[in-house]
Amino acid sequence: MGPPSASLARFAALLLLVPLAHAAEIHVPGDFDDLQAAIDAASPGDTVVVHGGTWGPIVIATPLQIVGDPAPLIVGDGPPFGSFDGPITLAGPGNGTVTLSNLNVGGTIHGFFYSHSDPGIGGGGFDALHVHDCEVRAPDWEFLTGIGVGEPAIDVSTPFVLVERSILQGSASKSDPFSPISGSAPPGSIGLRASGTVLLLDSTVRGGSAGPYFHNDVLCSGGCPPYGTGGTGVVCEELHHAASTIEGGEGADWFGVSGGFCCTQPDGVAMQVNGEVQLANDLVASGSMQMGATYSLDWSTAGPTATLFWSLGADPPMFLSGLGYVYLDAPTTRILGPVPSPSGFSLVLPLAPSAAGLEVGFQVLDHGSYLSRPVFGTLLP
């Protein structure tokens, strides 16, 4: 038996009412024919809905939500032999949150035209970056002439990063077969690098691979070159994670200039963090929050009873004595009710007007479970 039906009805009704007082919804194409123009015109808190297509590069200087319907592809670009700009650059005013939902980020970078790449998502200037239901890859080198250094999928200086139901992949560092290396060679790229705390839920993060590299010694007679380890999966100050895969990238294969195999460098490590909190997978959602579709939650805390909370948005982790870490947005947190545990419920998410991009979170807390995980998502059209 789940939470009282009256509580669920109030929750659904509130989702219908919130967008009425919420910020504007901007459609691309529709209100604007160009994604960057829509972003530049947005006010703090607005939602930009992108209806597929290929766009980029884009610069986000305002706290907002970008939602794909269906998922667009955001790529990097630049003038030939000029500066290459990554797909998404954050250049915030020093506060606020950017939320990205249902986007594909990546593309390629042409090695003949450019000498360096950029992350899939880079920059800073915001309090937080939230990424839901996205696939983010750093641009991948093609047509190399020399050495191409890989970049992280995400490399940001925001204090808090939330990633849920997403795939992050750092790009490979590699060289072309006609550029033998006599000195050092770059390692694989980091998958996700952030300056503060990362909350990783139901996601996969992989560091970039290194190589193949070609040594100027025909047979690598001096031994395996000590370069080209795989990239680290996650680098941050503190990592909180649940139900996620975190892996380092593959180490470089080294060859002699004649093509003979020499050796393989080690794969990268999964993480380099100053603190790690592995959360119990005691709250499971049915998937993304698609408006008009059935959304289900199931939980299995220590029980026999617990309290189900929800909020509009996420906050960095806060530790409460006797309950553990709480991740819900404090000003909007509400109680859906006391519930038996284990238990669950299903709800048809309302078709709320202008609600795309609205972020919703749930967490079940009881005094017997100190590492309970949250669930977050944005309402998708």
Image: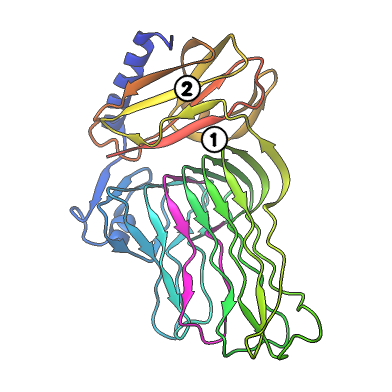
Q: Which residue is mark 2?
A: 298
The disc label shown at residue 351, or none: none
Q: Residue furthest right?
A: 222
Residue 371: where, in percent of width, then height? 65, 27
Residue 340: where, in percent of width, then height? 52, 9
Cα gap from disc 1 to disc 2, whole angstroms: 22 Å
Residue 213: where, in percent of width, then height? 63, 80
Count of labels shown? 2
60 or 188: nearer the viewer: 188
Q: Compared with residue 49, is residue 137 higher up or lower down, i.e. above or below?
A: below
Q: Residue at x 56, y 69 (%)?
A: 172
Q: Residue at x 25, y 62 (%)?
A: 34
Q: Secondary structure at mark 1?
A: strand
Question: Mark 1 or mark 2: which comes first in sequence?
Answer: 2
Residue 3: where, in percent of width, then height? 43, 11
Q: Which quarter of the image is occupied by the C terminus? A: top left
Is 23 within the magenta? no
Q: Residue at x 70, y 56 (%)?
A: 269
Q: Residue at x 37, y 42 (%)?
A: 45
Q: Compared with residue 255, is residue 355 higher up or lower down, i.e. above or below?
A: above
**Residue 207 shown left or right of residue 61 in the figure:** right
Q: Which residue is mark 1?
A: 315
Range drawn in magenta: 129-155
To which quarter of the image does residue 54 belong? bottom left
User: What's the residue type where badge 2 is placed?
Assistant: Asp
Q: Secondary structure at mark 2?
A: strand
Q: Is residue 33 visible?
A: yes
User: What's the residue type where badge 1 is placed?
Assistant: Asp
377 or 210: nearer the viewer: 210
Is 147 within the magenta? yes
Q: Is residue 148 visible?
A: no
Q: Compared with residue 341, is residue 41 higher up or lower down, i.e. above or below?
A: below
